[in-house]
Image (cartoon, rainbow, N blue to C red):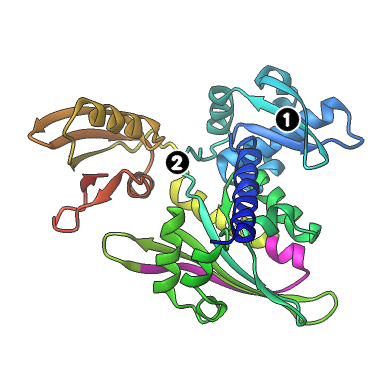
């Protein structure tokens, strides 16, 4: 390996790691992040509250439902706030009390979207006519194309989801070509995505048609690591300005996840379900299973009914609908569906 190649690889890894550290500051869905310009602090607090309500409910239109009574309670909902400089922008950051926010959403009869927010790997080809390239993590986070970088980063923070872009080092370049992505060869793309631990990925082609108009064709795809099958969850084709198209792509992805994992509590319907988890061979693994189940908003309560060898039987009371419970459970990386069983609620612990 040449010294130049090693230095270049180290440079890419450093900036990729740095971008992850920066992004981690915005991960909390109960934290509002507003670019501070000429707004008063009171206005910034209200904007942060509305952003948090969108992120936690998954409903982008919820701001229209927020009444003056709730806005007047903004200070009482806050846990802490302050200012922070990130990539040359000054942000007002406000962390809200999660219990109070959840209670406010329940009173508004809105769903609550918990921690089940899959990281989505994005394979995006940008074709300006004179140049055609696959966007890398370094390009998105430190690109001279501030328009593209800004809209992708801000939409993630506003909607409370995480997009990941490939490093595009030697390994990625050997694994995939532009033709694999534009041709929608799902197998090689899914295999390359496993390097990043991503079972959800976007395949997108962004092409400039004239000075102001672009076309964007994209798909959200899910890969099942056990069956080795891919499923296109939905696809979109649109034309317009670059920022509007990319903003809509992030928004549509967030809308899909919210529809799958947000919980609308229904006091009139109560469901129970038994699940079976194999591969629990130690107290440490049992403790981790408890943490996973405790983190799911779709679970009201649970108890370990039986431990037989390495298989644990868990009785669960479900919060909200059965569909949201199933979606949340099957999205957990530690719980892999046991396809050899006829009952879909058999899992292997990973």
Q: Is residue 244 magenta?
A: yes
Residue 252 vertical placement versus 261 (above, below)? below
Give the residue displayed 38% in from the left and 63% down from the top: 223
Q: Residues within 10 Å of mark 1 (few under 14, many from 20)?
A: many
Q: Which residues are magenta?
A: 230-246
Q: Position of residue 178 (x, y in %)?
A: 57, 77
Q: Say which quarter of the image contains residue 194.
A: bottom left
Q: Is residue 157 left or right of residue 176?
A: right
Q: Position of residue 51 (x, y in %)?
A: 69, 39
Q: Say which quarter of the image contains residue 102.
A: top right
Foreground tag (2 vs 1): 1
What label does residue 93 carry, if any?
1
Q: Position of residue 345 (x, y in %)?
A: 21, 48
Q: Residues within 10 Å of mark 2 (few under 14, many from 20)?
A: many
Question: Between 174 and 309, which is closer to the camera in this rendering?
Answer: 174
Q: Which residue is mark 2?
A: 263
Label 2 sits on a secondary structure element that is: loop
Q: Is residue 160 magenta?
A: no
Residue 22 vertical placement versus 184 (above, below)? above
Q: Position of residue 228 (x, y in %)?
A: 30, 66
């Amino acid at each position: 390996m040449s010294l130049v190649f090693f230095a270049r690889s180290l440079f890419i890894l450093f900036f990729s790691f740095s971008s992850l550290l920066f992004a981690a500051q915005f991960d909390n869905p109960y934290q509002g992040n507003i670019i501070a310009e000429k707004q008063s602090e009171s206005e910034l607090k209200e904007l942060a509250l509305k952003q948090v309500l969108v992120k936690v409910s998954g409903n982008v239109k919820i701001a229209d439902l927020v009444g003056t009574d709730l806005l007047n309670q903004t200070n009482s909902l806050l846990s802490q706030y302050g200012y922070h400089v990130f990539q040359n922008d000054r942000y007002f950051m406000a962390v809200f009390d999660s219990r109070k926010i959840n209670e406010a959403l329940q009173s508004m009869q809105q769903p609550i979207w918990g921690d089940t927010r899959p990281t989505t790997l994005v394979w995006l080809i940008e074709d300006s006519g004179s140049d055609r390239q696959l966007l890398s993590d370094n390009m998105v986070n430190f690109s001279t194309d501030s328009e593209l970088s800004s809209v992708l980063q801000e939409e993630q923070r506003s909607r409370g989801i995480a997009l990941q872009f490939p490093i595009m080092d030697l390994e990625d370049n050997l694994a995939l070509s532009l033709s694999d992505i534009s041709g929608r060869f799902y197998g090689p793309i899914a295999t390359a995505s496993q390097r990043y631990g991503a079972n959800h990925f976007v395949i997108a082609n962004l092409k400039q048609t004239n000075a102001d108009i672009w076309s964007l064709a994209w798909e959200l795809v899910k890969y099942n690591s056990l069956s080795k099958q891919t499923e296109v969850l939905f696809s979109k084709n649109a034309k317009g300005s670059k920022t509007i198209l990319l903003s809509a792509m992030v928004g549509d992805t967030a809308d899909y996840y919210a529809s799958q994992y947000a919980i609308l509590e229904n006091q009139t319907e109560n469901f129970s379900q038994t699940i079976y988890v194999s591969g629990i061979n130690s107290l440490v693994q049992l403790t981790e299973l408890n943490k996973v189940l405790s983190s799911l908003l779709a679970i009201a309560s649970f108890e370990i009914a039986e431990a037989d060898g390495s298989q644990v039987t868990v009785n669960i009371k479900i919060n909200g609908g059965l569909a949201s419970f199933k979606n949340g459970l099957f999205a957990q990386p530690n719980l892999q569906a046991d396809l050899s069983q006829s009952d879909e609620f058999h899992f292997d612990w990973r």
